[in-house]
Amino acid sequence: MKFLAFIWHRITAAFSTLLLLALLIALFLGYKLANSEQSDDQLKLQGKHEYLTEISHQIDSGRLRPNIVFILYDDLGYGDIGEGAQDNTLVATPNINQLAAGGVVLTDFHSPSPVCTPSRAGYLTGRLAPRAGLPNVVFPTGSTKGLLFRLLTRPGSHSRLPAEEITLADLLKAAGYATGMVGKWHMGDRSPSLPNDMGFDSYFGALYSNDMEPFALYANREIAVEAPADQRYLTERYTEAATAFIEAHAAEPFFLYFAHNFPHDPLSVREERSGQSEAGLYGDVLEEIDDSVGAIVATLERTGTLENTLIIITSDNGPWYLGNAGDQRGRKGNTFEGGMRVPFIAHWPAAIAGGRTEPAMAMGTDLLPTVLDLLQLPAPEDRLLDGRSILNVLTSGTATPHDYLYYYDGETLFAVRDQRFKYRGPAGVFYSTDQVPVGAAAPQKEWLFDLAGDRRESYDTSDHNPQELKRLRDAFTAKNKEMDDNKRGWN
């Protein structure tokens, strides 16, 4: 008995030592992460400044430049508004519907990522998230969730948009536009990667998702509404700031980036809005942000700027817990169509004929190249852009400018597609049951979906389409090699 007690004592002592050692290692790594400082590429930063200076000298003051209002929703599903919501009778969005009827709807448009931070980086830079150096969600500086996430993903990963990236706001500011942002930034909470550092003359909003703490609202670099900001009035405050920006800059070309925090969870509306929608609280939120669109349009009409304003409405990824992904497989967080195929509406009376839907595939990375094309400005020569101009798609209904679209989650390429077929490489597909709180990714072989007759990605057709399988597999392999050789895409 003494011998057994001795053995048990030694085992428990060894276990305690290992546990203490693991705790010390975790604390050390956490301390290193919390105190690590992300560095920027000084050579590319210089190239950015030189390019923007060059752009500022190429502007033709006599050329008609449209105002641009880019409205980005958070976790809005393909079936919540627009073309995908034709059978959605529970949510009333008359203002958005009116813009869709008077503009063009892209029925095959995709977010750059299935989650928020990398998607926003893709929209603003024209580059896929691994290129833009921000492939993962970021958290408030020093937060426990942020430290844990970086430990579980990649300890050396960036926690803010690299300062050398050129944003749409940088470009338009150099082109003589007044630039303003309202809403959710979520690409870092420290300089030199704050909105005012990355091309925006003015900013009002939250630096993170509305489920992160501390949730304060900023006016430029200073806190305007202390945490926790009352989210019942969030859409109202954002709309007031957005309309005020339009009114202040109606006499000059302006760019407004209006990035809602909703319908990301937690959902909240003003008390008088609660219970108004047949779709419950989610519907209440959608109908309030539709009213916000109505206020934007009314302000543009009142200031005489609607005719020459390009309004774009879309989402950063598919729906989360609630929301309508349309007739598609998947939701936020995965690279099936439901996670990345999102609504897209463009309204510009001066140049876009209304009442059209276009099937050309496109992605959020196309926004910056489209603006370059619109203003007839050159792209930067020191970096690759993953997007392509879709200006002719919007104005003339041409075919897609893409041979392929690439579906990344983090730094991993999961799928590639052309206008008809989609190849998904060998990967795990997440599965769980309602009574099991933790799921896992079950390994699967490569799949080939024929999206022409199977938008839900239900059937692997690789046996019937061997040539298409090989072609898309080759494109998948080539993209992985390209990223391995030059991930940030520097020339």
Image (cartoon, rainbow, N blue to C red):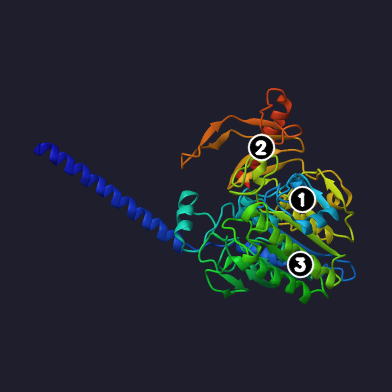
In primary-sequence order, the first of circles 1 and 2 is 1
* Residue 225 placement (x, y as % from top left): 57, 74
Element type at mark 2: helix
Relative to 478, 99 lies left or right: right
- Disc 1/disc 2 C-alpha distance (Å): 31 Å
Q: Amino acid at mark 2?
A: Phe
Q: Which mark is residue 295?
A: 3
Question: In this orientation, which residue lies closer to the viewer: 36 or 451?
Answer: 451
**Relative to residue 11, is residue 256 drawn left or right?**
right
Residue 3, located in which quarter of the rendered image?
top left
The quarter holding residue 484 reads top right
Q: Amino acid at mark 1?
A: Gly
Q: Position of residue 435 (x, y in %)?
A: 47, 39
Q: Residue at x 50, y 54 (%)?
A: 156
Residue 82 disc label: 1
Residue 306, can we see it? yes
- At 56% from the left and 66% from the top, the residue drawn is 189
- Residue designated by label 2: 476
